[in-house]
Image (spheres, rainbow, N blue to C red):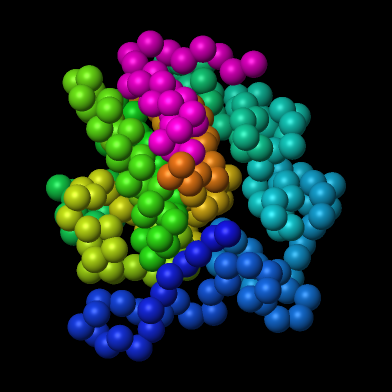
Amino acid sequence: MRWLIVLCGLGASAGMSCISSHCLRDADCPGSQVCREQAGACEEPECTADADCGHGKVCEERFCVVGCASQDDCASSEECVDRRCHRIGAECECPLAHEFCGTDINPNSPTAGTEVCVPGDFPDGVGLFFGSVYCGHCTGDYAALQQRQSELAADGLAPRMVWVQLTTALATPEDVGAHLGPDVTDPVIHDTDALRIWEAYGSTWYHFILVDAHGCYLTDHGPLDPTLVLGEEGEAIVSEWRDAMDEECPPPTP
């Protein structure tokens, strides 16, 4: 079950604001509308299968989004990976991760208030976590990922993470600092209708996507929970994260 904890009416001193008209599940929506989870908004469903969507779009969670059902939906210079067309890198024959830049809203981050770009600012690769700082499940996942991150750091590596905040879960730097705490110093970038990071990566709640040192889209893990991160799936994440920081090109996708 997905939880989004929002406390209202606490006053400005609490550093919190309500998320209006936000849905987490279909039951939150009126009539025939369903919850579009990536946007957190109630809308009329658009599709039940990929065939209901036009060329260059696929049906996900009952809505048509930009994507690919097969390699035929992508240009010759692109590769269909996880239902998204990715450009093929020149340095490595790999699907390139979606590029984006946003302001870091984590007041405890060294880059707070400045523009952070993925993958450009992360020459050793980066892990992207998709969630909301108001969500207890999300912060639990992130704490578990930090434990895995520390394992790699103990080996002399410098694994990096970025939190990608849900578009409709509006958060200020004060909110981020209060909910993530001083121990989270990674950048937090707020997704927007203009950036559409969640959609570009085909991601939703509790997902962790690895981008390697060459800017290649490597792997997608999720939906996660702390038990998975600290268990067998977490072992796979550590291994792939280590590979993501390697100078060698990743093997070509099948």
Within the magenta stretch, is there residue 236?
yes
Camera-side residue of 215 and 26: 26
Tell me if 153 is positioned left or right of 20 in this view: left
Tell me if 206 is positioned left or right of 77 in this view: left
Camera-side residue of 102 and 203: 203
Q: Is residue 224 visible?
A: yes
Vertical order, 18 against 188 (above or below) = below
Q: Residue at x 52, y 35 (%)?
A: 220
Q: Is residue 192 visible?
A: no
Residue 205: x %, y % from top left: 52, 53
Tell me if 78 is positioned left or right of 13 in this view: right
- Number of numbered discs overlaid on the protein picture: 0
Residue 175 sits in quarter: bottom left
**Residue lying furthest right:** 51
Quadrant of the image containing the C terminus: top right
Residue 24: x %, y % from top left: 58, 67
Residue 203: x %, y % from top left: 55, 47
Q: Residue at x 49, y 31 (%)?
A: 233
Quadrant of the image containing the N terminus: bottom right
Residue 167: x %, y % from top left: 46, 63
Tell me if 21 is positioned left or right of 76 in this view: left
Vertical order, 145 against 80 (above or below) = below
Q: Residue at x 74, y 50 (%)?
A: 59
Residue 21 sits in quarter: bottom right
> For the magenta stretch, what is the residue range?
228-254
Q: Residue at x 66, y 24 (%)?
A: 76
Within the magenta stretch, is there residue 12?
no
